[in-house]
């Protein structure tokens, strides 16, 4: 990569000037404004004063030495401001990018080596199976799946998990609601009044046992949830039952391990965990209620036992939970519980998704406008559903304009990106119809690619590996969405201004542009796959 070549040239120059100590890393970045050059380094600023040099004077000497024997691809080296070293490059560096992309292809290009096989468990969605998924439940499912795709491409071993809350009070209330509807009665206060409960009641032929009726209903609802998620390409590796934790020795074993840490104590007949020593501002939390309160384990106790299973039974190196913002208060206590088990709490990560609203107003059950997630998918399609939920950061409130997404125009962000890929496929088809075969890339004169539209496509392709790496490290798959939209825009500009084939296009230029089209196709296919969005051949 050009960055490595420029860094090596700068390091060699610093040795020539006997600069001590040499920096461990030499930073290079793309200037925000093109007139400042193609690449810029602050190396003179970072090392000058420590080495007894005025940074601008050092930058001048570096530029002088490099200009005397220019590195490959470099047209000139200049200094700017208090001591920045700016490189202006020949277009050939971008032609090398094209070769890198097409040689590596969709399987090999943009695969940063970050994970090195580290196992990561991603738990997301995990909505209670007490009713169909609504938009608020399902909106971040694409985030979890796209993050899994990003991390897998960066070398992690990723497992997707849905935690099934199939026990406890909400399952009993669901069962009571089913039984009431079966008797022709209104559901009890705090129950589930949805029409889906009536359908479940008609199917249930078991005894008048709220737990049994609730589990019957939850199983049916879970089938619906699974089908809804599969319709947008979400397939979980594990559907982990809460009951398997709470109806096994796991809770007692977890409590025994917590006791051995010295952080469990009894107060007012209940068992408490000292969480303050591990950063929880509340200081202490109940693990098991007093006998007077029923003697039940709390949700926190079950959650700690579940995470004990993740870390100490299934041995995941790292765990990422994707929760709604309303669970913010649970983060500190869970991390404290994990720490009390002797697990580094940094191995547990919780990403919180913020509020979702329609352009016409907020979505919410209490507001009376909750939308079934399956209805949204049926309305705008799985690709648009996924793409929309990945257009902004998970920690930013999101507003969805359904009218814009329904439109099959360039104003529709999904259509805009997918249409770029369809245009690539159209060019391939026309070339085939005209019997214009691409020659091997090493036999093609890529130096003919000099139009700014062509170079913009290549600059954007160059940025994919770094964009992917940052999306992985920062858990920000929306950066891939931003990138594919930029590449699509660059390609649409190229398509408009640079004919690939025609009487006015020399055959050698056609060959070079066909390879540019192929490189753009590789980039779009990688980006769309990371988002879980299809790359259609026609639209």
Image (cartoon, grey):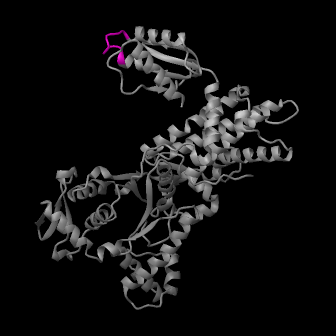
Residue drawn 44% across and 55% down?
157
Residue 3 seen in this snapshot: yes
Q: Position of residue 36 (x, y in %)?
A: 55, 18
User: Considering the image in quadrants, where does the N terminus appear?
Assistant: top right
> Left or right of 121: which side holds 460?
right
Residue drawn 86% across and 35% down?
502
Q: Position of residue 155 (x, y in %)?
A: 46, 49
Q: Is residue 276 above or below residue 42?
A: below
Image quadrant assignment for residue 249: bottom left
Is residue 321 within the magenta segment? no
**Bounds of the magenta span?**
47-54
Front-lying residue, 186 or 404:
404
Q: Is residue 181 above or below residue 380?
A: below
Q: Position of residue 31 (x, y in %)?
A: 52, 24
Magenta highlight: main SS: loop
Q: Position of residue 40 (x, y in %)?
A: 49, 21
> Left or right of 95: which side holds 228?
left
Image quadrant assignment for residue 50: top left
Front-lying residue, 392 or 335:
335
Front-lying residue, 201 or 474:
474
Count of marks, rendered view: 0
Q: Is residue 197 above or below residue 92?
A: below
Residue 387 seen in this snapshot: no
Q: Is residue 160 above or below residue 209?
A: above
Residue drawn 51% across and 53% down?
149
Residue drawn 79% across and 34% down?
510
């Amino acid at each position: 990569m050009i960055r490595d070549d420029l860094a090596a040239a700068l390091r060699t120059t610093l040795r020539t000037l006997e600069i001590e100590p040499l920096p461990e890393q030499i930073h290079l970045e793309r200037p925000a404004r093109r007139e400042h050059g193609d690449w810029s380094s602050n190396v003179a600023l970072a090392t000058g004063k420590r080495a007894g040099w005025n940074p601008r004077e050092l930058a001048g000497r570096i530029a002088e030495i490099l200009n005397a024997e220019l590195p490959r691809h470099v047209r000139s080296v200049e200094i700017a401001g208090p001591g920045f070293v700016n490189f202006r490059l020949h277009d050939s560096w971008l032609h090398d990018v094209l070769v890198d992309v097409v040689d590596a292809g969709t399987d090999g290009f943009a695969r940063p080596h970050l994970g090195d096989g580290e196992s990561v468990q991603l738990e997301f969605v995990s909505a209670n199976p007490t009713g169909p998924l609504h938009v608020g439940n399902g909106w971040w499912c694409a985030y979890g799946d796209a993050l899994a795709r990003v991390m897998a491409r960066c070398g992690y071993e990723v497992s997707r998990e849905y935690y099934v809350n199939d026990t406890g009070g909400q399952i009993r209330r669901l069962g009571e609601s089913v039984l009431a509807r079966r008797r022709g009665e209104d559901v009890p206060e705090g129950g589930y009044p949805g029409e889906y409960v009536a359908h479940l009641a008609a199917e249930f032929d078991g005894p008048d046992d709220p737990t049994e009726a609730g589990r019957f209903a939850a199983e049916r609802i879970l089938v619906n949830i699974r089908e809804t998620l599969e319709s947008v390409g979400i397939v979980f590796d594990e559907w982990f039952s809460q009951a398997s934790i709470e109806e096994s020795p796991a809770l007692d074993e977890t409590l025994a391990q917590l006791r051995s840490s010295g952080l469990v104590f009894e107060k007012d007949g209940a068992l408490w965990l000292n969480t303050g020593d591990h950063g929880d501002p509340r200081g202490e939390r109940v693990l098991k209620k007093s006998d007077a309160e029923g003697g039940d384990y709390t949700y926190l106790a079950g959650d700690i036992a579940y995470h004990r299973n993740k870390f100490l039974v299934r041995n995941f190196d790292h765990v990422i939970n994707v929760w709604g913002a309303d669970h913010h208060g649970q983060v500190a206590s869970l991390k404290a519980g994990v720490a009390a088990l002797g697990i580094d709490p940094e191995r547990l990560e919780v990403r919180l998704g913020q509020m979702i609203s329609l352009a016409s107003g907020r979505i919410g059950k209490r507001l009376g406008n909750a939308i079934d997630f399956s209805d949204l998918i049926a309305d705008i399609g799985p690709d648009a559903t996924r793409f929309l939920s990945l257009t902004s950061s998970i920690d930013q409130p999101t507003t969805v304009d359904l009218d814009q997404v329904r439109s099959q125009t360039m104003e529709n962000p999904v259509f805009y990106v997918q249409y770029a890929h369809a245009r690539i496929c159209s060019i391939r088809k026309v070339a085939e119809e005209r019997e214009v075969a691409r020659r091997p890339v090493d036999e093609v004169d890529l130096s003919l690619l000099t139009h700014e539209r062509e170079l913009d496509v290549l600059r954007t392709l160059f940025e994919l590996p770094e964009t992917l790496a940052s999306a992985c490290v920062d858990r920000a798959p929306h950066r891939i969405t931003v990138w594919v939209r930029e590449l699509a825009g660059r390609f649409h500009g190229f398509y408009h201004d640079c004919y690939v084939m025609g009487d006015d296009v020399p055959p050698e230029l056609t060959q070079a542009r066909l390879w540019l089209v192929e490189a753009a196709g590789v980039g779009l296919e990688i980006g769309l796959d990371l988002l879980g969005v299809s790359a259609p051949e026609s639209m």
